[in-house]
């Protein structure tokens, strides 16, 4: 029976306002609307029963709310959401109950299967709704801020698309004179040195010519291999420009060699990569490295924020974006340390500046405050004297960072605190006491300190401490059980009637994206990492590695990672005022009004919180025994 034209158009308008229907062709939407029937379900009635007769049928909620699952805390679906999505004619594994009077478009199993064949967007959504929503949400961010990125190319393109010519290369035994003649003939400033199989082993640039040949008076008959820069930074040709950007930022490279299956296929310079941005990484890093005093570093903090805005506008994903911010903040802190250390007489003391918390995970946002510490090694009997020198230095760095706009830690978790300036032995003793006697204070501290990584100084000190902790933590079952229980204390803020549980009092109507969002993933990933002896501190890397240890499907792990990254991206957008410009969604810092988000962001937020709940259940089943 064909639906009346007015009813058909009204149904199409409703569908187009929601995902994945907004991306579907009209003929496919007409197929759905023409074959669906409208069903009414009074409050408390079962819409779909687990293992019921309507195997493979599809429901699109048009009005009202439906709860998924038996428990009262089950996820609540709102208008525009479809269920169940098992597909393939399978009976639903979940019971769906109307929490209020609800109207649903009902599509029979055969028609739902046909729709999956007709419509690629719907088929993709059916296979894995979290990943499909994440992709669409990322695209929406890019579309919403495309006006801010006018005349800029996207950082999501592969680096091979940025290559303008074939690479100029030579073997390492080539005389300098020959290599320079080749560079002049080809009009390039860089030549790559390769082995017999065209694998890059070094690069030689005009800067190398000045510093390593001309000034030292090296003969031009010398082989390139003796004066080249060995082990150049490299990325594969299908890596994105944003991934190359993160590598360049993390290591301070000016050039990257581009490879395909390990073999040289091009050379990418800062100019090639950073021409994609109005405020370039080259400019920010050059300003940081060239700073002669602390005052000269001040302008770079604004440039880092501007660069973050530009990357958001270009559609950069959360993981490389936060790693880029972390790499620039690392460079800023490292330069500050270089400037301040000479005045504090640290000669004869081996020390390493540690980043903790979100800094240690390379997940800091623009609004992050300081979390840092010092580890040192000194001869027997010289610890106190070494500590006093290091404390004066650390306090100077902490105060200078605060002056540069990186707030002091309210809890005094900073290197200038004597409790955070410890020798190798003292850190081991402190960590061991937390593992042996995991009270509430120890668990809270572990959540911050156990995410440490080296930032400046002797990294070997931090690496040894990490190996020691990685060996000891898995053999601490009581600590792991309590750490897991601690990670499960905060439930995802999913409502029983409305979509989200928001705050009361001064935070009425708002949701904390950090405490009730990203932290759920961070805490679970840390518990898995400590239990499985995973040395990596990044949440996404920890989840991927833990997923392999547990034998999880790759798509399930990807759903966890993408949900975490979406929450991170939402935090960055809120902090940079980009949610406020969309409709007043931002409240303050990490808090947002979830109901002021657009429809797609609301759905992705809900799906991300569902994934957080699924991750917590996995953690409970694995480590809470």
Image: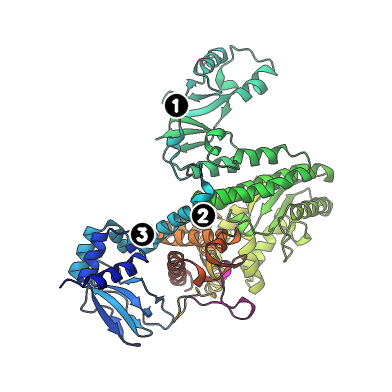
Magenta-colored stretch includes residue 514: yes
Q: Are marks 3 and 1 in contact (CB under 8 Å)?
A: no
Please name whichever residue, 180 or 592, is drawn nearer the observer in this view of the structure: 592
The answer to whether residue 316 is seen in the rendering is: no
Q: Position of residue 597 (x, y in %)?
A: 49, 67
- Disc with the residue nearer the chain's start (1 vs 2): 1
Q: Position of residue 482 (x, y in %)?
A: 56, 73
* Region in magenta: 500-515
Q: Which residue is mark 2?
A: 318
Q: Residue at x 58, y 28 (%)?
A: 229
Q: Which residue is mark 3?
A: 553
Question: Is disc 2 placed on a helix, strand or loop?
Answer: helix
Q: Position of residue 497 (x, y in %)?
A: 44, 82
Magenta-colored stretch includes residue 355: no
**In the image, residue 211 above or below residue 459:** above
Given the current orientation, which residue lies at the most extreme front position? 6
Q: Residue at x 19, y 67 (%)?
A: 111
Q: Is residue 136 left or right of residue 221?
A: left
Question: Is disc 1 placed on a helix, strand or loop?
Answer: loop
Q: Which residue is mark 1?
A: 165
């Amino acid at each position: 029976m064909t639906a009346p034209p007015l009813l058909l158009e009204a149904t199409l308008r409703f569908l187009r306002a929601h995902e994945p229907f907004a991306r579907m062709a009209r003929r496919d939407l007409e197929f759905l609307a023409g074959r669906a029937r409208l069903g009414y379900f009074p409050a408390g009635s079962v819409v779909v029963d687990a293992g019921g007769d309507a195997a493979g049928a599809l429901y699109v909620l048009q009005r009202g709310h439906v709860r998924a699952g038996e428990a009262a805390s089950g996820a609540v679906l709102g208008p525009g959401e479809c269920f169940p999505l098992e597909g393939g004619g399978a009976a639903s594994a979940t019971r769906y109950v109307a929490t209020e009077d609800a109207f649903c478009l009902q599509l029979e199993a055969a028609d739902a299967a046909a729709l999956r064949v007709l419509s690629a967007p719907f088929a993709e959504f059916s296979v894995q709704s979290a990943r499909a929503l994440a992709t669409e949400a990322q695209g929406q961010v890019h579309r919403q801020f495309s006006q801010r990125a006018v005349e800029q190319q996207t950082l999501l393109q592969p680096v091979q698309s940025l290559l303008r010519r074939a690479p100029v290369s030579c073997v390492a035994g080539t005389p300098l004179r020959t290599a320079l003649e080749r560079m002049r003939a080809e009009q390039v400033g860089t030549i790559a040195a390769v082995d017999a199989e065209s694998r890059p082993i070094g690069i030689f640039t005009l800067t190398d010519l000045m510093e390593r040949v001309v000034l030292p008076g090296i003969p031009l008959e010398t082989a390139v291999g003796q004066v080249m820069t060995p082990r150049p930074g490299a990325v594969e040709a299908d890596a994105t420009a944003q991934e190359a950007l993160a590598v360049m930022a993390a290591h301070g490279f000016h050039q990257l060699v581009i490879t395909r299956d390990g073999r040289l296929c091009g050379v990418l310079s800062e100019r090639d990569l950073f021409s994609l941005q109005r405020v370039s990484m080259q400019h920010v890093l050059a300003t940081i490295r060239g700073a002669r005093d602390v005052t000269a570093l001040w302008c770079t903090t604004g440039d880092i924020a501007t660069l973050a805005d530009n990357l958001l506008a270009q559609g950069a994903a959360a993981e490389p974006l936060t790693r880029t911010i972390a790499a620039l903040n690392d460079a800023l802190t490292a330069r500050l340390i270089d400037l301040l250390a000479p005045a504090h007489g640290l000669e004869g003391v081996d020390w390493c500046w540690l980043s903790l918390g979100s800094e240690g995970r390379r997940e800091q946002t623009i609004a992050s405050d300081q979390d840092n510490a010092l580890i040192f090694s000194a001869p027997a009997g010289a610890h106190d004297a070494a500590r006093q020198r290091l404390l004066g230095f650390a306090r100077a760095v902490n105060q200078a960072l605060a002056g540069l706009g990186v707030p002091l830690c309210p809890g005094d978790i900073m290197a200038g605190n004597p409790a955070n300036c410890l020798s190798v032995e003292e850190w081991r003793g402190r960590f061991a006491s937390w593992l042996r006697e995991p009270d509430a204070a120890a668990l809270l501290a572990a959540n911050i300190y156990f995410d440490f990584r080296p930032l400046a100084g002797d990294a070997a000190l931090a690496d040894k401490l990490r190996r020691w902790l990685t060996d000891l933590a898995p053999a601490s079952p009581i600590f792991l059980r309590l750490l897991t229980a601690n990670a499960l204390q905060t439930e995802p803020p999913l409502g029983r009637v409305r979509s989200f549980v928001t705050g009361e009092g001064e935070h009425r109507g708002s949701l904390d994206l950090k405490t009730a969002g990203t932290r759920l993933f961070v805490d679970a990933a840390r518990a898995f990492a400590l239990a499985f002896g995973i040395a990596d501190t990044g949440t996404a890397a920890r989840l991927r590695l833990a997923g392999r240890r547990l034998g999880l499907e790759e798509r399930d792990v990807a759903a966890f990672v993408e949900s975490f990254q979406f929450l991170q991206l939402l935090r960055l957008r809120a902090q940079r005022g980009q949610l406020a410009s969309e409709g007043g969604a931002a409240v303050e810092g990490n808090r947002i009004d979830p109901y002021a988000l657009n429809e797609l962001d609301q759905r992705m937020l809900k799906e991300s919180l569902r994934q957080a709940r699924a991750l917590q259940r996995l953690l409970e089943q694995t480590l809470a025994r």
